[in-house]
Image: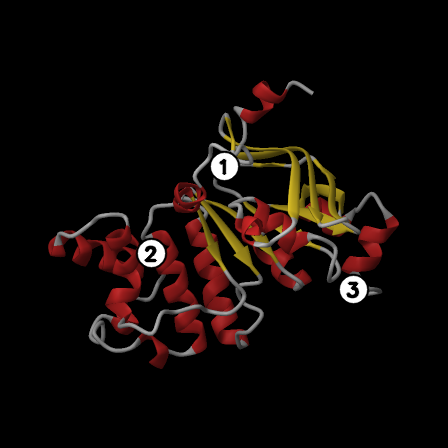
Amino acid sequence: MNVVNTIEQSVIQTENLQFYYGTHHALKNINLKFEEKRITALIGPSGCGKSTFLRTMNRMNDLIPGVKTEGAIWIGKENITDSSIDPVELRKKVGMVFQHASVFPFSIYENIAYGPRIHGERNKKVLDEIVEENLRAAALWDEVKDQLDQSATGLSGGQQQRLTIARTLATKPEILLMDEPTSALDPISTAKVEELIQTLKEHYTIIIVTHNMQQAARIADFTAFFLNGEVKEYGQTATIFSNPLFSETKEYIAGKFG
């Protein structure tokens, strides 16, 4: 495969990616590329490697003792698995939203301003603009604009998750990773976050892990089906769901295992 040519057509590409927890071979020869400003859903049964794969994209797995990564993960023409890459700088470019909203026990304002401050921004006017801009981007501004000095922990679960997304956007990432961002939310909050995700793809490349097949079908442009640490099938979501190549994909989508 001519890696250089294909990299220029995608934002992220993995090349023969292998990942180990000690002696456990968790990811096996993953070769995927993610298109710019598209949503890709990662689906598959529990323990199949989806979340592990997602965390390789911003080196979150580095925090776990005894892990090993082989192969390459290209963002543009930079291999982010290289030891010379600063994980802190990488995580500015590749933001992550987790399953449970992780708001800080600060005010709503300080939750958004925290990241820019860490990276050196001190101008109050600039911080005000960053807070408003990103709360608007997360479709939360109109709901909280009059309570910015109140604790973020007082928000509803859905609002907290959108605040977490706004906080992630404040560091100006290019790529958004989402690990089951609506699994802890009620249907109304889930719908709001899904609508937000679809809006965000106008500006960001988004990779989302989900166990919700209906959600993947609703919001994802592409879908990758993981099974036993391998990518069993990858393609346009409409094709994966209507005409999968493999019986395992069809059976998983139909809910026969998982």
Q: Report which quarter residue 187 is drawn in.
A: bottom right
Judging by the rendered image, the residue that carries numbered circle 1 is: 36
Disc 2 marks a residue whose amino acid type is Ala
- Is disc 2 surrounded by few (<14), some (14 to 19) or many (20+) residues within 10 Å? some
Left or right, residue 196 beside residue 82: left
Callouts 2 and 3 close, C-beta under 8 Å: no
The answer to which of 5 and 136 lies nearer the viewer is 5
- Where residue 174 appears, as percent x and y from the top left, is 41, 41
Answer with mark 2 or mark 3, whichever residue precedes in sequence: 2
Please state which amino acid type lies under the numbered disc 3.
Answer: Gly
The Cα atoms of the two marked residues, 1 and 3, are separated by 30 Å
Disc 3 marks which residue?
258
Kindly state the secondary structure of the residue where label 1 is placed.
loop
Secondary structure, mark 3, is loop
> SS of the residue at dot 2?
helix
Q: Is residue 185 left or right of residue 241?
A: left
Residue that mark 2 sits on: 137
Residue ID at (34%, 81%): 154
> Can you give x and y, in whole percent of width and height, for residue 99 in the image?
54, 66
